[in-house]
Amino acid sequence: MWGPDPLIYDTTVFAQAPESWNVLWDPKYRGKISVWDDLSTVYMAAQVLGYDKPNPPQLYNLSDEQLEAVKKKLLELKPNIRKMWSTGGELTNLFQNHEVVAAMGWPLMTNQLRKINFPVGETIPKENTTGWIDHLMITAGSENQDLAYEFIEYMIEAQTQKKVTDVTGYTPANPQAAQLMTPAEVKGLHLDDVDNYQKRLYFWQNVPRRAKYNEIWNEVKAAQ
């Protein structure tokens, strides 16, 4: 499965999808925003500052000067942040309790909220976003490799991928799963235009200076 880190929003507050990540910095949403307690939030701020132009992989190799600018930008966001979420359930509850109106999240939360008829929307802003791919792997020391292969083969079957998508809202790795979906589901998962959709996602890459990124992120979190 794969998916983005989209901007999730309460449709009773936003008449239309926000066009930019900058909406999170709007003073009128003071104490009403949530972001992920993860380096992805650093990437997002770097995109707002344009550091992915013209080279998207630059997000994962920012200079000290760029990281300082990212820290400054995130510190400006702090007054708007109600909570930095660390689990999907936390963000879902924040929306349900009307504690936040917009957040950086996952399709999983959007899917959970829609299932309980919460008025929620999801978008990828004009700055684009980062994304990830979930993998299944067999360890070199596995004592049950045959069983592991059987499990992986089961997991990538179209029917299984469809079931996982129903729960998570993530895009299936097996494109044949689309044959088991309604036209609305196919469109919602962007399976009707995968190539163009993926151009808006910068899939995570190795961060050579992860320790420095973590240092910057921890300084942001610790700031009062």
Image (tube, rainbow, N blue to C red):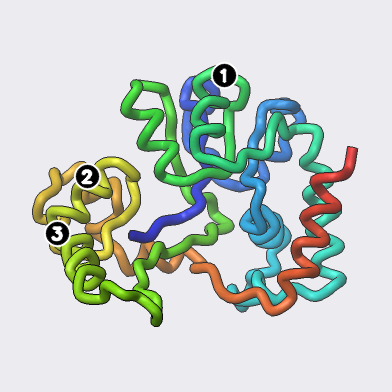
Q: Residue at x 73, y 39 (%)?
A: 25
Residue 218 x, y percent position in the rendering: 80, 53
Label drawn at residue 98: 1
Q: Amino acid at mark 3?
A: Ala
Q: Is residue 86 above or below residue 42?
A: above
Label drawn at residue 185: 2
Alpha carbons under labels 3 and 1: distance apart: 37 Å
Q: Amino acid at mark 1?
A: His
Alpha carbons under labels 3 and 2: distance apart: 14 Å
User: For the residue labelled by badge 1, is the local secondary structure a helix, a strand or a loop?
Assistant: loop
Q: Is residue 120 above or below residue 188?
A: above
Residue 119 x, y percent position in the rendering: 41, 23
Q: Is residue 163 left or right of residue 97?
A: left
- Of tags 3 and 2, the one toward the viewer is 3
Is there any visible trace of residue 175 in the rendered image? Answer: no
Alpha carbons under labels 2 and 1: distance apart: 27 Å
First in residue order: circle 2 vs circle 1: 1
Pick whichever, 73 or 133, lies toward us.
Answer: 133
* Label 3 CA crowd tier, 10 Å (few <14, some 14–19, many 20+): some
Q: Farthest residue to the right: give it.
A: 224
